[in-house]
């Protein structure tokens, strides 16, 4: 794993060593030749440390003390220079400098992001989340520890922001601008990591909406207490899906077409009524949703209720925080967001 701070620390140390050898050597020559210009002193130091050998610029052979100092400088200074240059060269050859530039670019882009989503874990579950985010044209950034998975993600999806790091680390979460994120998806490899991630994310951004994966069904309640707003258990959903396939196959086919059918443009969408919405205290009939967005509201949930009202009546009064469900394209979804949020 690329350690950003360790790389910078090594870079600074070796640049400092080179500067000390260069300017320290010139300072030593200044002690023997106080009347010489600093340009000549620095030039003498440079040809001594680099072993170029242009000549005895300061005529140190006539000064025993200066000659002894020059020999010491060649032995000690050259050792420092060779060690530092070889280390810096290794950092560049190993691609560390390229990784630094890539990380800096990701950080700059992440700082500009607002109201985005953070996907933690791009494995077998996370990759489908990434694909759905792209289909719905959402801004998001991915955190992953496995370099092989990162390579696959960058190969399969163009221009996806991926941070190589531990999603449970405060430092990594700060890099993805979590404090301004709208939502977080926790699809790490273990329930323990997802649990810790939920706690950490809620501490850093109490308003963030979290959806977490649960491998074991028994940990669902713990994840919710840790800060997850929604918990998805793939094993449980898989069992329900198998039963639904034989009990209500047409319903399953319909839902599949909405979630991952060939017509990727149509999706079941949702929108919440915002504080500044002009439709607060009006009815659905007053809003005329179909006339404005060409969609029908298929379900409605009041802000103080857990259950949905399916096929809501036209006289349903709209209140701040209510949620509307509909079927539409990405453009229709954006239009619904604009007029309600």
Image: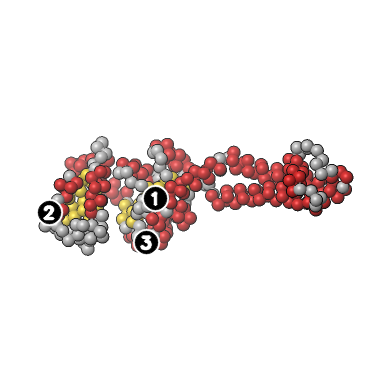
Question: With respect to residue 103, does 304 lie above or below?
Answer: below
Residue at 54% from the left image edge and 49% from the top image edge: 3
Quadrant of the image for the C terminus? bottom left
Q: In which image quadrant can residue 245 be found?
A: top left
Residue at 38% from the left image edge and 55% from the top image edge: 180
Q: Which residue is mark 3?
A: 206
Q: Which residue is mark 2?
A: 285
Q: Nearer the viewer, residue 194 or 80?
A: 80
In this rendering, the label closer to the viewer, 2 or 3:
2
In the rendered image, residue 298, in percent from the top left (x then y), is placed at 17, 50
Q: Residues under labels 1 and 2: Cα distance?
A: 36 Å
Among the two numbered marks 2 and 3 on one chain, the one whose residue lies closer to the N terminus: 3
Q: Residues under labels 2 and 3: Cα distance?
A: 36 Å
Question: With respect to residue 320, does 238 lie above or below?
Answer: above
Q: Which residue is mark 1?
A: 113
Regarding mark 1 in the picture, which secondary structure is present there?
loop
- The answer to whether one can see residue 119 in this image is no
């Amino acid at each position: 794993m690329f350690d950003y701070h360790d790389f910078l620390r090594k870079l600074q140390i070796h640049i400092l060593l080179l500067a000390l050898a260069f300017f320290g050597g010139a300072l030593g020559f200044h002690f023997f030749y106080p009347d010489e210009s600093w340009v000549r002193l620095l030039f003498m130091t440079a040809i001594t440390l680099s072993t170029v050998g242009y000549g005895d610029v300061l005529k140190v052979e006539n000064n025993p003390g200066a000659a002894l100092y020059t020999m010491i400088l060649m032995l000690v200074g050259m050792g420092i220079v060779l060690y530092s240059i070889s280390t810096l060269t290794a950092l560049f050859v190993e691609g560390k400098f390229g990784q630094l530039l890539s990380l800096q670019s990701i950080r700059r882009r992440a700082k500009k992001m607002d109201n985005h989503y953070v996907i933690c874990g791009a494995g077998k579950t996370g990759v489908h989340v990434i694909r759905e985010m792209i289909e719905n044209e959402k801004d998001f950034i991915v955190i992953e520890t496995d370099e092989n998975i990162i390579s696959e993600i960058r190969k399969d999806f163009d221009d996806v922001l991926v941070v190589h790091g531990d999603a449970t680390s405060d430092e990594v979460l700060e890099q993805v601008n979590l404090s301004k994120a709208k939502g977080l998806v926790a699809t790490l490899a273990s329930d323990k990591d997802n649990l810790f991630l939920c706690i950490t994310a809620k501490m850093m951004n109490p308003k963030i909406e979290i959806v977490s994966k649960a491998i074991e069904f028994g940990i669902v309640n713990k994840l919710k207490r840790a800060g997850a707003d929604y918990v998805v258990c793939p094993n449980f959903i898989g069992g329900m899906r198998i039963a639904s396939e034989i009990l209500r196959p047409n319903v399953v086919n319909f839902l599949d077409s909405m979630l991952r059918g060939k017509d990727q443009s149509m999706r079941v969408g949702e929108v919440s009524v915002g504080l500044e919405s002009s439709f607060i205290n009006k009815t659905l009939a007053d809003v005329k949703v179909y006339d404005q967005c060409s969609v029908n509201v298929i379900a409605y949930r009041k802000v103080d209720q857990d259950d949905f009202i399916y096929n809501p009546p036209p006289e349903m009064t709209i209140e701040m925080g209510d949620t509307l469900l509909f079927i539409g394209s990405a453009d229709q979804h954006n239009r619904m967001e604009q007029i309600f949020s």
